[in-house]
Amino acid sequence: GAVVSQHPSWVICKSGTSVKIECRSLDFQATTMFWYRQFPKQSLMLMATSNEGSKATYEQGVEKDKFLINHASLTLSTLTVTSAHPEDSSFYICSARALSMGLPEQFFGPGTRLTVL
Amino acid sequence: GQNIDQPTEMTATEGAIVQINCTYQTSGFNGLFWYQQHAGEAPTFLSYNVLDGLEEKGRFSSFLSRSKGYSYLLLKELQMKDSASYLCAVMDSNYQLIWGAGTKLIIKP
């Protein structure tokens, strides 16, 4: 149980385009999902906390207009990188808490590797 | 401020034992997590400690001392596949995870 999927696994796009990444909890309902970014050889950086049915809470320094987060249902959250630039190239990972299953840990999706040309 | 400290890199020999330490200072405490992350992959959950003491799970054990703000992850009978980064994370009073920078573990034959 507690499986999180992410789509796509990798994406290459041109500078200036927008990219949408989906995060789904497959076998549990996730009222809270988290979006992380990880640059090579660096630790995870929390970008935002996504709550179902409400606006996401962004970490300091993360542009909410550039990284649009939507959490429309208890099993789906999306991250849209708008007007992507090469410096946005990174490994984007989502996670979800399965508190409804009595589990305190966050379960991670497999990640999406974004390369902006 | 909130702070998680763990060594940047450690090296160990296949078949040996290694202990990865983590110290923390956070606003509140709702548990400490250890995750394993192989290069290019997402983290996978290893252990969760919320009470003092040792939790054993196969070759991996995790220890917590809340009074000392200290935890360690113990890996026994090291295998080459254990080469990865090990992330320590503490859940604070707001149930947010505060992440350490990770310890890169290199296993040599």
Image (cartoon, grey):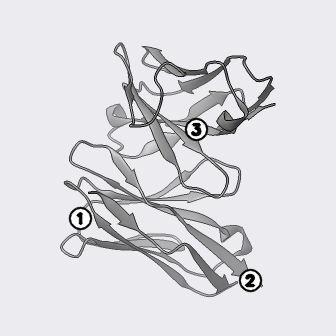
Q: Residue B108: which numbered mark, if any?
A: 2
Name which residue type carries label 2: Lys
Q: Residues within 10 Å of mark 3 (few under 14, many from 20)?
A: many
Which residue is labeled 1 in the image? B51
Name which residue type carries label 3: Ile
What distance separates the C-alpha of mark 3 from that of mark 1? 29 Å
Mark 1 lies on a secondary structure that is loop
Whether the residues at callouts 2 and 1 have beta carbons within 8 Å, the answer is no
Which circle's residue, 2 or 1, is located before the other in the chain? 1
Which residue is labeled 3 in the image? A93
Q: Residues within 10 Å of mark 1 (few under 14, many from 20)?
A: some
Which quadrant of the rendered structure holds the C terminus of chain B?
bottom right
Closest to the camera, between mark 2 and mark 3, is: 3
Chain of the residue under the numbered disc 3 shown in the image: A
| Residue A57: image location, x then y, percent | 36, 27
Using the rendered image of the protein, determine whether residue A112 is visible from the camera's viewpoint: no
Asked if badges 3 and 1 are on one and the same chain, I answer no
